């Protein structure tokens, strides 16, 4: 209709639309890049569970309960590690803490944190898995 304002004819509207589309495309690319980074950095351990925790089997044989001292994270990595340990140490049941158990499994991002846990809970190193989980003996069951 002649004389009516048209969005297609107004250059400022077209410019705003292009800017919004460009910003949206950049944000979508950033989100996809972060998602790809998360997926591409996940690397399951190359060794089977039985091999990784083989050094724990003999010392913990016959135990009905084994304590756990995970690090402060409660994420998917924590859950995966707990499930693997339950499988490897079955029929023993994993329980939180050190009370009433002869052995404790612990893991952390750094060796210093493991040393601090051992000192704090008076634990003695028994074995280490290939992926950094440590089996400790408690001072008293």
Image (cartoon, rainbow, N blue to C red):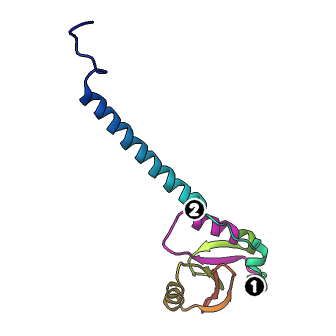
Please tell me whether residue 59 is drawn above or below residue 90 in the rendered image.
below
Q: In which quarter of the image is residue 64?
A: bottom right
Residue at the image point whose x is 69% and y is 69% from the top: 84
- Residue 39 location (% of width, % of height): 59, 58
**Identity of the residue drawn at 52% across and 65% down:** 74
36 horizontally vs 24: left or right: right
Sequence-wise, which precedes: disc 1 or disc 2?
1
Asked if residue 101 can be seen in this view, the reply is no
**Outermost residue, top side:** 1
Count of numbered tags = 2
- Is residue 28 highlighted in magenta? no
The front one of 129 and 106 is 129
**Element type where label 2 sits in the image:** helix
The magenta segment? 63-85
Residue under the image location 61 percent in, 89 percent down: 138
- 1 relative to 16, above or below: above
Quadrant where the N terminus sits is: top left
Q: Position of residue 109 (x, y in %)?
A: 53, 78
Residue that badge 2 annotates: 76
Q: Is residue 51 above or below residue 35?
A: below
Magenta region includes residue 80? yes
Instruction: Tell me the crowding category of disc 1: few under 14, some 14 to 19, or many 20 or more residues within 10 angstroms, Cα based.
Output: some
SS at badge 1: helix
From the image, tell me which residue sits under label 1: 55
* CA distance for labels 1 and 2: 25 Å
Residue 57, given in percent of the width and then of the height, sits at 77, 82
* Residue 73: image tag: none
* Label 2: how many Cα within 10 Å (few below 14, some 14–19, many 20+): few
Q: Quadrant of the C terminus?
A: bottom right
């Amino acid at each position: 209709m002649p004389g009516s304002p048209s969005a297609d004819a107004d250059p400022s509207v077209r410019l705003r639309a292009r800017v919004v589309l460009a910003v949206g495309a950049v944000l979508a690319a950033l989100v996809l890049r972060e998602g790809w980074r998360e997926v591409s950095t996940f690397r399951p351990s190359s060794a089977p569970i039985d091999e990784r925790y083989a050094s724990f089997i003999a010392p913990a044989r016959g135990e009905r309960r084994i304590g756990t001292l995970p690090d402060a994270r409660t994420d998917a990595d924590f859950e995966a590690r707990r499930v693997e340990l339950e499988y490897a140490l079955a029929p023993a049941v994993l329980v939180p803490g050190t009370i009433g158990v002869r052995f404790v499994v612990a893991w952390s991002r750094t060796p210093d944190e493991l040393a601090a846990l051992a000192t704090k809970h008076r634990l003695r190193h028994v074995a280490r898995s290939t992926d950094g989980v440590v089996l400790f003996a408690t001072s008293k069951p």
